[in-house]
Amino acid sequence: MNAIDKRALVIGGSLAGLFAGTLLRSIGWQVDIYERSPHNLDSRGGGIVLQPDVVEAFQRAGIIYEAPLGVVAHERYYLNRDGSIAQPMPMRQTLTSWNLLYGSMRRHFPVEHYHQGKHLTEIQQDGLAVAAMFADGTHETGDLLVGADGPTSIIRHLLLPDYTTQYAGYVAYRGLVDESELDPATAKLLTERFVFYQFSNSHILQYVIPGENDSLIPGERRFNWVWYVNYNQTSELPDILTVFIGQRREYSIAPGMIHPTVEQAMRSYADRVLAPPFQKLVAATREPFVQAILDLGVPQMAFDRIALIGDAAFIPRPHTAASTAKAAANAIALVDALVDSNHDVPKALEAWEGNQLALGMRLWESGEALGERSQFMYGEGRTEG
């Protein structure tokens, strides 16, 4: 049977699912992506440090893009408490956005094969094929099913019900600020640099990313910031993850949805503890958002004709800057294994799994070490300034 006769079902239509879908199509597979959300996803997320695996995935999938795929930062600055520069470091990196990567892949993937509002309820396989059943009563059958449905993966829950995400003890506040909305002196310090401010049990960082409509034109880009803050899981986290209409979210609150009391407390805390350039950056942010930092690792990623990839399998803490790259690496290795095994799915997944488990575990352990050093060097609490 030729590759063109093979069909893949990809569950999850965010970055990991699109990496898998576009790369599988590049080796001749028929692919359908099923996304649980009925809404477009192009309004979520902030900045991403561009890694080589993502560039390789774009190239191999034949996705046309304007080079570079983001904004180039030429150096890193570490700030003192008064906002002066403590330590400059030459370091060239490209910083991109979730929206740019998602939009580029989404436009490349055939719209008729990207299905929204598809909530998976059950999976079955018999050695010859794998089937997916959805809440709307429909079902689909293929040769391969890719579980790319993120931290709350239904695929993982069905296959490995004992493995769930664990709260790491802190959250990431995030925000985006248009270049034109920051005062000139602060903008000059932060533009095209990776800037950090570290203090007891916390740190904040920022870099410039593409702006509206993926613009890379100076003056039209955005400052992207991330601030890690400790909160107790029992006494504090439930309030942080409650949206302004009073509903509790599992692990993140979207822009514009943070409860006003939580947002005001965050802004007041920023004024007390952050270096002045970051105080100004947070103050200029119209709609901050927040996500709980999670840990997740699994002992198995291949299940006959089913593969778990991306955050459905391992969630490295964001300090590694590797979550998106890991999803791309999982997908690249998957298509390589399929080609090497002449598209024999069980054989390919068996060959694929070992290195991907090792990659996930290495990033998981590295991220945990970085996070523990950053957030808990002086106990579990927060610096009050």
Image (spheres, grey):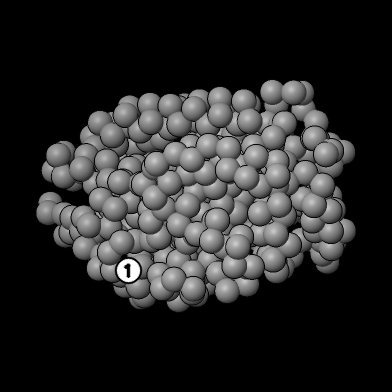
Residue 252 percent across, percent down from the top left: 67, 53
Residue 363 against residue 277 in the figure, above or below: above
Residue at point 34% right, 42% down? 330
Residue at point 35% right, 33% down? 356
* Secondary structure type for disc 1: loop
From this viewpoint, is residue 281 visible?
Answer: yes
Name which quarter of the figure residue 67 lies in. bottom left
In the picture, which quadrant includes the C terminus?
top right
Residue at point 39% right, 50% down? 74
Q: Is residue 145 toward the left or the right of residue 150 in the image?
A: left
Residue 97 against residue 173 in the figure, above or below: below
Residue 361 against residue 289 in the figure, above or below: above
From this viewpoint, is residue 31 visible?
Answer: no
Total labels drawn: 1
Residue 75 percent across, percent down from the top left: 43, 46
Name the kind of residue labelled 1 in the image: Phe
Task: Name the residue beneath numbered marker 1.
Answer: 109
Residue 109 percent across, percent down from the top left: 32, 68
Name which quarter of the figure residue 164 lies in. top right
Residue 278 percent across, percent down from the top left: 67, 53
Residue 337 against residue 117 in the figure, above or below: above
**Closer-to-camera residue (182/243):** 182
Q: Is residue 87 toward the left or the right of residue 384 in the image?
A: left
Question: How dense is the environment of label 1, judged by Cα within 10 Å: few (below 14), some, or many (20 and up)?
Answer: many
Residue at point 27% right, 41% down? 333
